[in-house]
Image (spheres, grey):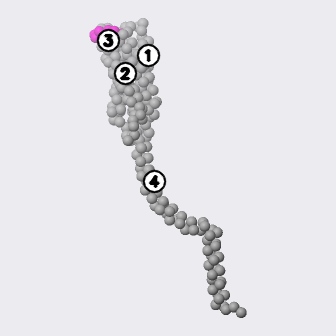
Amino acid sequence: MSNPFEQKVEMESSSSIIGSGSQDCHPESIQTTVAPSAWQSEKQSSPVLTARGDDAYLQKRAPRPPNPWRMSLRVIQLLSCIGLFGFQAGASPWSNEMPFQNNVGLLYYVYAICCVAFIWSSFMVYVYLTRRYRQANNLKRGVALAVDAILATLLGVGVCFESATYACTPGQYHGWCDFFNTGLFFGMLLFASYTFSSLWDLFGGLDCLRADH
């Protein structure tokens, strides 16, 4: 007959052996006890990195404030359009004469381009104001470059042909040449401003070629 004390010792030793065997058969139980500590450390450090990354991303993607010099250039274009159309279209009503009737189509060509330029400059002023006071997005650089370049080319052709075709001295035709020459001055100013806008758009688009520091 066995001693009860010896049976109790044997039972405790067997239970300890079974417990150790169960841990060997299920190693993931040991891993789960270690994994939370590493996960917690990563969780604690991740918000700082995420916040820094978000700040850098927002700084990179933040819209640029509108340039007041571009606004001034568009205002000059608007005033030039008014001066070009007003003086050249009002030359005949003021002087009651219409010289160069054989080439009157050139005047209508310049009037049409002047109206398109006025509409485009007004739209660009609207874009500036919405960016300034409503935090709106800017116009695509390629669209602005294309329209400015086309208008600069068409205005250059019109102004050059007017200078060569309607050559008249000041005071001639009862003041018609005075009005026309004044309008021609505004046309040259308009052509120069659109040429400058085209170059500004071009160089601004090529700004992406700069090296990042």
Q: What element carries label 4?
A: helix
Which secondary structure is most common in the magenta stretch? loop
Amino acid type shown at disc 1: Tyr
> Alpha-carbon distance for marks 1 and 2?
15 Å
At 34% across and 16% down in the image, what residue appears?
184
- Percent x, y of residue 140: 45, 34
Nearer the observer, disc 2 or disc 3?
2
Q: Is residue 187 left or right of residue 30?
A: left
- Percent x, y of residue 78: 36, 27
Q: What element carries label 2?
A: helix
Q: Mark 3 — residue?
A: 177
> Given the current orientation, which residue lies at the most extreme right position?
1
Nearer the observer, disc 3 or disc 4?
4
Label 3 Cα crowd, 10 Å radius (few <14 / some 14-19 / many 20+): many
Callouts 3 and 4 close, C-beta under 8 Å:
no
**Tag on residue 191?**
2
Callouts 2 and 3 close, C-beta under 8 Å:
no
Q: Is mark 3 on a helix, strand or loop?
A: helix
Range drawn in magenta: 166-171
Task: Please identify the quadrant where the N terminus is shown.
Answer: bottom right
Q: Mark 4 — residue?
A: 50
Task: Please identify the quadrant where the C terminus is shown.
Answer: top left
Callouts 4 and 1 close, C-beta under 8 Å:
no
Q: Which of marks 3 and 1 is nearer the N terminus?
A: 1
Amino acid type shown at disc 2: Phe
